[in-house]
Image (tube, rainbow, N blue to C red):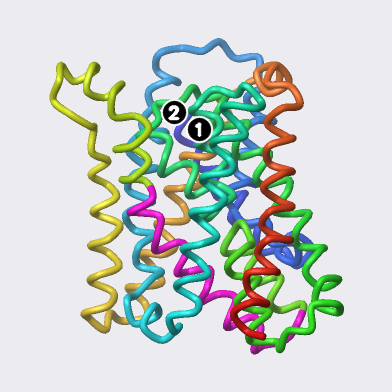
Amino acid sequence: MWIRLLAIAGGAMVLAQLPQLAGVGLSALPLAILLGLIYGNLSQRPAQAAAQAPILWCQRHALRAGIVLFGFNLSFQQIAALGWQVVAIDLLVIGTVLAVGIFVGERLLGLSRELAVLTSVGSAVCGAAAILATEPVTRARQQDVAVAVATVVLFGTLAMFSYPLIYTAAGLPPSAFGVYIGSTVHEVAQAVAAGQSIDATAMRSAVVAKLLRVMLLAPVVLVLGALLFRRRDTAANGGAGVAVPWFVFGFIAAAGINSAIALPDFLLGGMRLAAQLLLALGMAALGIKTHWRSIRRAGVRPLLLSALLFVLLLGGGLLLNAGFYH
């Protein structure tokens, strides 16, 4: 099973480099879960304990290690260079999407709290990586994680085709439009692709604004765990309080090291590649264990929630950015 997992994760990373897929911002993570789904649903092999052990290891340990190493993509200097406007925009976008998504998903659409939170955090912060980082706090079922990833990837891809059309009517300069892209797009790879569709200035602004949203992943996970899942964790731990996702502090420490020390390019590149591989392994394992019927059983309501958040990000985000830059 290790060979299959590595083949799926490595294949996803290779496919993500193809111009046709990179052009729409499809990164290795959604491709890994898709390939894992295909393999898991077509394979007729019985679920033996020897095969399950690598899958469980990837779902638990590889994901957490990948999130920690993902912190080396960021530095606090990037935040300082942005200016207060971008920080304010990102905070408002994340707070609004989380509040609306969780309320509508749980109260109006009748979704489980876990699915509503995972879908909302994927839209609000950084797509599949945010969903994976939040999953240990919510203790969601694997089909909820798969459904959240699938819907967020779908509407993140649709957004890629929307930004060039919006740019012609928005009246924002390229740098400001790049901030709009970075503050509303789902995935880091999509920020690069969408920015490139405008120009180099827009791409730089989009990537930096997007990386700030990624930086906010750590406090978002901690706050969601403390506010929404504290009672469950207290009961599960015999009254010991909220379960702390320690890997989040590793994520912060990695960003701090990258901010304080000028690490060699080859070392940074190696850690970023390792982070991508570990996260792709986790997504491959999730895909293998998820059946199509589980996703079909979720129905249309998760799609409706992701569609609402898609409209909120593009429409509300445009109004917010226009208000700051006009």
Q: Give the image quarter of residue 207.
A: bottom right
Q: Sequence order check: which comes first, mark 2 or mark 1? A: 2
Tell me where residue 47 appears, x and y as whole percent: 51, 13
Front residue (pair 195, 66): 195
Q: Residue at x 67, y 47 (%)?
A: 309
The answer, for residue 140, to whether it is visible in the render is: yes
The residue stretch that appears in magenta:
198-220
> Dot 2 corresponds to which residue?
55
Q: Is residue 42 magenta?
A: no
Could you tell me if the residues under marks 2 and 1 are in contact, i.e. CB atoms within 8 Å?
Answer: yes
Looking at the image, is 114 positioned above or below residue 24?
A: above
Callout count? 2
Q: Amino acid at mark 1?
A: Ala
Looking at the picture, how far across and down is residue 19, in whole percent?
75, 67
Residue that carries the numbered disc 1 in the rendered image: 285
The residue that appears at 54% across and 32% down in the rendered structure is 145
